[in-house]
């Protein structure tokens, strides 16, 4: 179940990083590139059947996503060099 929790957490953080770092035109360019590279090939997603995933794994993945929901990305305003940080909402990095 730890793997499922981690997958949920990583998925949510990936969405956060993408929203933070990629303006829409970059996302569109990435989508075009991936579509070109995968044209005519089979789906590259994990091959896990829904029937093979137990309730405990689904709950663990959901809790991983919930755990990541409190994370935030920010760029310090008064820094000498532009650094990007990840930290807990309402807490220190």
Image (spheres, grey):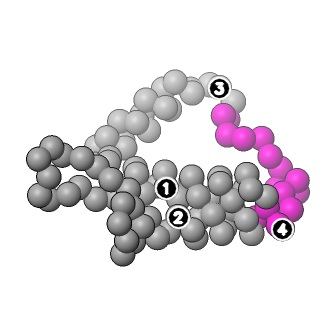
What percent of the width, then of the height, locates residue 82? 18, 46
Q: Which residue does the numbered mark 1 point to in the structure image?
A: 13
Which mark lies nearer to you, 4 or 3?
Answer: 4
Q: Residue at x 28, y 59 (%)?
A: 74
Q: Is residue 49 above or below residue 70?
A: above
Q: Which residue does the numbered mark 3 point to in the structure image?
A: 41
Name the quarter where the N terminus is drawn: bottom right
Secondary structure beneath dot 4 equals: helix
Residue 55, label in figure: 4
Q: Are marks 3 and 1 in contact (CB under 8 Å)?
A: no
Q: Are marks 2 and 1 in contact (CB under 8 Å)?
A: yes
Considering only order in the chain, which callout, 2 or 3, is on the residue closer to the N terminus?
3
> Mark 3: few, some, or many residues within 10 Å (few <14, many ≥20)?
few
Q: Residue at x 36, y 42 (%)?
A: 28
Q: Which residue does the numbered mark 2 point to in the structure image?
A: 68
Secondary structure beneath dot 2 equals: helix
Q: Which residues are magenta?
A: 43-58
Give the quarter of the image for residue 87: bottom left
């Amino acid at each position: 179940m730890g793997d499922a929790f981690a997958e949920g957490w990583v998925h949510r953080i990936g969405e956060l990083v993408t929203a933070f770092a990629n303006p829409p035109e970059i996302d569109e360019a990435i989508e075009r590139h991936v579509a070109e590279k995968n044209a005519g090939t089979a789906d590259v997603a994990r091959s896990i059947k829904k029937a093979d995933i137990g309730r405990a794994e689904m709950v663990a993945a959901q809790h991983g996503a919930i755990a990541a929901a409190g994370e935030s990305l920010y760029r310090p305003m008064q820094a000498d060099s532009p650094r990007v940080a990840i930290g807990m909402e309402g807490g220190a990095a």
